[in-house]
Image (spheres, rainbow, N blue to C red):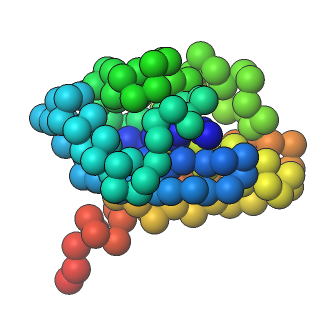
């Protein structure tokens, strides 16, 4: 199974996939003050409660937009799986089915890159991906898989009301 970890500003989303099928998904609060050991304890409990074995994990991938949690979550995944995760960052962008503009290599969040990869892999044509997270984001991809642009606005929970 694939262990996928998306460390966002508000939540950490952990998912297990068997081939293309989502087996399990959990959301826990992102907290840069929490240690790797605390996250490991939480995840071990979640796996146990779901009746899932860590030994079933044969690969892992991780994305984060919270730099302070990069190191702790690499340690979390290593401890759970015995292997370092594939970390989505600019060093692997040339291997992806979408192309990130050179001028935006370090400006577009890895969460948006992952969204673009999934959308383009599914549809193979021009599309706009909308993500309702801490921020509301729009990522435009053309039919050649080039990311044309990104727009980011406050999300529903952070925009406030008048």
Quick one: which residue is furthest to the left in this view? 33
- The image position of residue 24, as x and y in percent, is 50, 56
The residue lying at 49 percent from left, 18 percent from top is 83
Question: Which quadrant of the structure image shows residue 49?
Answer: bottom left
User: Residue 112: where, in percent of width, then height?
Assistant: 55, 45
Placement of the N terminus among the 4 image quadrants: top right
Residue drawn at (83%, 57%), measured in percent from left and top? 123
Q: Quadrant of residue 122?
A: bottom right
> Image check: 118 left or right of 54?
right
- Give x and y (percent) for residue 67: 32, 28
Note whether 119 is above or below 76 in the view shown: below
Observer-nearest of 143 and 110 = 110
Q: Residue at x 41, y 35 (%)?
A: 64
For residue 126, above or below residue 5: below
The answer to whether residue 143 shows anywhere in this view is yes
Relative placement, left or right, of 159 versus 62 is left
């Amino acid at each position: 199974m694939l262990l996928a970890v998306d460390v966002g500003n508000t939540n950490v989303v952990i998912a297990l996939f068997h081939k293309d099928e989502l087996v399990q998904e959990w959301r826990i609060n992102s907290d840069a003050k929490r240690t790797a050991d605390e996250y490991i304890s939480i995840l071990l409990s979640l796996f146990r409660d779901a009746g899932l074995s860590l030994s079933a994990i044969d690969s892992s991938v991780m994305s984060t937009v919270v730099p302070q949690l990069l190191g702790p979550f690499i340690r979390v995944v290593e401890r759970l799986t015995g292997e370092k995760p594939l970390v989505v960052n600019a060093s692997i962008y040339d291997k992806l089915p979408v192309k990130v503009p050179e001028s935006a290599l370090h400006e577009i969040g890895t969460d948006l890159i992952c969204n673009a990869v999934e959308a383009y892999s599914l549809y193979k044509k021009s599309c706009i991906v909308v993500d309702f997270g801490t921020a509301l984001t729009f990522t435009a991809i053309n039919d050649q898989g080039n990311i044309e642009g990104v727009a980011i606005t406050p999300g529903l929970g952070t925009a406030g009301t008048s």
